Image (cartoon, helix red, strand yellow):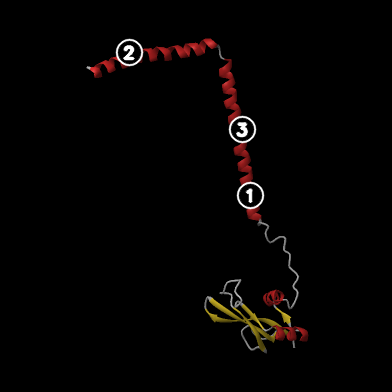
Amino acid sequence: MAVAIRLSRGGAKKRPYYRIVVSDSRSPRDGKYLEQIGTYNPMLPKDSGERVKLDEDRARHWLSVGATPSDRVHRFLDAAGILERAPKNNPKKGEPGEAAKERAEEKAAKAAEAEEAAKAAEEEAQNAESAEAEAPAEEAAAEEAPAEEAAAEEAPAEEAAEEDKGE
């Protein structure tokens, strides 16, 4: 008979509570078991001592007889220092899927295009500035003259307005 140490679910809907049981591996999950060796309450905080209760002597006995623990129970036994569990390594777990990779490539291509467009606009602005600097000084003086005339015309109008206020 193949013996397994596994969890048997109890508790209400959306409020799980598990028994750590030793049972025949062919029996149903919540069915008949040989012995209950502990409990697991996932609703309690991870640092709580009441979260996992385990009878270590009985667990050692069943392991010596050849019982095989489920993955979750194996983690509990490792935390209790009863049975060493080698950490698993899945390097592809954190890798994005194909669609996500395609989206990232499209986003990078759009960012590169936007960067090139910004550089081109900068170069055009620099070229326009250098073209203005090369323009003859006469044109610049001619542009400044009308501005000076307009300022001169505004000054007498302002003085007249001040005189009207003083009266």
Mark 2 or mark 3: name the one nearer the start of the chain. Answer: 3
Which residue is label 1 attached to?
104
The disc labelled 3 sits on which kind of residue?
A: Lys
The front one of 65 and 45 is 45
Q: In this view, does 136 lie above or below 49?
A: above
- The residue labelled by disc 2 is 156
**Is label 2 or label 1 in front?**
2
Q: Examine the rendering and report whether any part of residue 2 can be seen.
A: no
x, y (%) of residue 59? 71, 83
Q: Quadrant of the N terminus?
A: bottom right
Q: Nearer the viewer, mark 1 or mark 3?
A: 3
Q: CA separation, marks 1 and 3?
A: 23 Å
Residue marked by disc 3: 119
Contact flag, marks 2 and 1 (Cβ < 8 Å): no
Task: List the single residue furthest toward the front.
Answer: 166
Point out residue 24 in the picture as x, y percentages from the top left corner. 70, 87
How far across and down, in percent of the image, does residue 21 sit?
66, 84
Q: Which residue is drawn at 61% across and 71% down?
A: 47
- The secondary element bearing badge 3 is classed as helix
In this view, 111 is above or below 7: above
CA separation, marks 2 and 3?
48 Å
